[in-house]
Image (spheres, grey):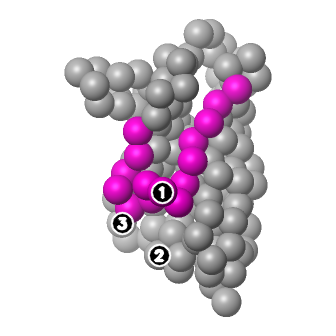
Amino acid sequence: AQLVESGGGLVQPGGSLTLSCVAYGGFFSIDAMAWYRQAPGNQRDLLASINRYGATTYNDSVKDRFTITRDNAKNTVFLQMDGLKSEDTAEYYCNTGYYWEGRYTPGPYWGQGTQVTVSS
């Protein structure tokens, strides 16, 4: 089982990117999926999560700019990022997990990450 992210790159401030993450092999009936990011020297932060029915939660830092969606049939989760800022520069990771007492709880599988750089 593995998660593979794609879609990162260099974008100018105010621009947009869409990240994708596919869960390959061994994932059955995924409960929840999420996107995290980690900048050098910082902790890995939860950005957004989505359950199998499409209900979403967002970190306040990206709410109203980022949108998480998923395609259950393809075991894929997406992160549409609009209005990108320099502080969004980081390595972005996806994760499969579950909700416990209303909070997203990460599972053991992580992708390799995809780099997003926002710069003019």
| Vertical side of 119 occupied by 44: above or below | above
Q: Name the N-terminal-most of marks 3 and 1.
A: 3
- Looking at the image, the residue that sits furthest to the left is 101
| Vertical side of 120 occupied by 73: above or below | above
Comparing 89 with 69, the one in front is: 69
Q: Secondary structure at mark 2?
A: helix
Which of labels 3 and 1 is toward the front? 1
* Three-letter code for the amino acid on which mark 1 is drawn: Asp
- Contact check, label 2 and label 1, Cβ < 8 Å: no
As drawn, the label of residue 113 is none
- Contact check, label 3 and label 1, Cβ < 8 Å: no
In the rendered image, residue 6, in percent from the top left (x then y), is placed at: 74, 50
Quick check: can you spot residue 120?
yes
* Three-letter code for the amino acid on which mark 2 is drawn: Glu
Alpha carbon separation for disc pair 2 and 1: 16 Å
| Vertical side of 95 occupied by 41: above or below | below
| Vertical side of 65 occupied by 79: above or below | above
- Residue beneath the point at 63% across and 15% down: 27
Q: Name the N-terminal-most of marks 2 and 3.
A: 3
- Residue beneath the point at 47% across and 75% down: 87
Comparing 108 with 53, the one in front is: 53
The magenta segment is 57-71
As drawn, the label of residue 64 is 1
| Residue pointed to by mark 2 | 87
Alpha carbon separation for disc pair 3 and 1: 23 Å
| Residue pointed to by mark 3 | 42
Alpha carbon separation for disc pair 2 and 3: 12 Å
In the rendered image, residue 22, in percent from the top left (x then y), is placed at: 71, 33
